[in-house]
Amino acid sequence: MTEQLDLTKIREHITALDQKLLELFAERRALTLNVAKSKAHQVRPVRDQQREQELLVRLINQGKKLGLDAHYVTSVFQTIIEDSVLNQQAYLQQLTNPNLQLPAVSVAFLGDKGSYSYLASHRYFSRRAETIIESGCQSFQEIMQLVESGHVDYGMLPIENTSSGSINEVYDLLQHTNLSIVGEITQPIEHCLLTAVNTSLDKIKTIYAHGQPFAQCSNFLDKQHDIRIEYCDSTADAMAKVYQLQDDTVAVIGSEEGGYLYQLHALEKSIANQDENHSRFILVARKPVDVAEQIPAKTTFILATGQKPGALVDCLVVLKQHGINMRKLESRPIQGRPWEEMFYIDVEANLKSLTLQEAINELTAITKFIKVLGCYPIEHISPTNVPSSAL
């Protein structure tokens, strides 16, 4: 009994400390927003990675004196730094685009609650809106149509995955829309095998999932025997199906976080082919946005060169000559024109910059077609490097 009482007191003490930590995190976040306000009228980058590195080294040294592991301190504060940077960027974007400051936004995404697109939408707007009005869709085309018609403000679309590659259907739809890309987010994809009832892997006979998770978990699936694969329109549809069946012989591939929404539990975790599995999503809207000069920007455009030797190389040389870093190059067939390709290009540059404007003018002169799909803040925050000597 005495041991139980001691354990209760220890847990109460931990709970009290956790509450204090949350209050300190909130206070720190408020201060970083004040930093953003000080930069609002100055063209100074949000990030100062030299200062971040100095901060981490100092915190690591202080942590060691308190008996804290260097990697633990680094992990905690890299997360805090990322949160600070993203909040500052969101604040500066709201100042640059005052017409977008709304308490509620409507978003269309693939599937229903629990899908990876659902999770990406909520994560993206957690810093930008108080309320999200959800519109689950059965196809990428339906998402685009809802945004184009004005029924929703935004559409969240997966564009590529580190394991299965580009989502070609989305690239093809972007050829034929007037929507603009206004944001991006990279969502970690942590595939699990989820079930509605307690069971074991050897009892599973049917697995439900969207086509992308099946492709991303092919190594795990190849090791299973006598299992039927059932394709669904979305991960959310697959999870809802398994929940409804309440059968110990069926399972679904999805995220543990999404599974909680359907009262599913993880039978097997980390079943993806790659340990580091991420999907990049783009956000589309009817009107483009301006990107604050203090924020790293990415611009996406498409172009067609025609069937001339070296035509694509000539385009890439233009970017090189202007010192513009290309992040992605994707080719897709042009419908109705056999053997001709449309090239999608992501570059690290603000569309308002003189450098990119000059490059686009030069590209316009040497291509058959060029169209800017959008300029938007770079959402991915790379961790600040810490010298090995500090670890």
Image (cartoon, grey):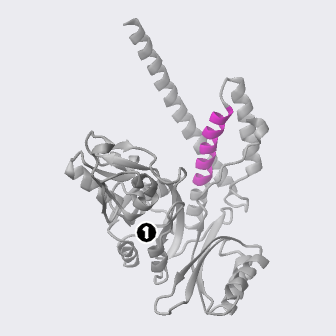
Q: Is residue 135 above or below residue 173?
A: above
- 62 inside magenta stretch: no
Q: Nearer the viewer, residue 144 or 267?
A: 267
- Identified at 72% across, 85% down, the residue is 314
**Helix, strand or loop for the magenta stretch, by majority:** helix
Taking the image as shown, residue 343 lies to the left or right of residue 188, namely right
Q: Is residue 275 above or below residue 61?
A: below
Q: Is residue 223 above or below residue 357?
A: above
Taking the image as shown, residue 166 lies to the left or right of residue 389, namely left
Q: Residue furthest front?
A: 225
Q: Secondary structure at mark 1?
A: strand
- Identified at 58% across, 63% down, the residue is 93
Q: Residues within 10 Å of mark 1 (few under 14, many from 20)?
A: many
The quadrant of the image that shows the N terminus is top left
Q: Is residue 378 above or below residue 12?
A: below
Which percent across, then down, holds residue 122?
A: 43, 55
Q: Nearer the viewer, residue 373 or 96?
A: 373
Q: Nearer the viewer, residue 99 or 169?
A: 169
- Identified at 71% across, 80% down, the residue is 316
> Quarter of the image holding residue 363?
bottom right
Identify the amino acid type marked 1: Tyr
Give the residue at mark 1.
154
Which percent across, then down, holds residue 365?
A: 69, 92
Q: Residue furthest top?
A: 2
Which percent across, then down, holds residue 186?
A: 53, 58
Note whether residue 354 is visible: no
Q: Which residues are magenta?
A: 70-87
Taking the image as shown, residue 240 lies to the left or right of residue 15, namely left
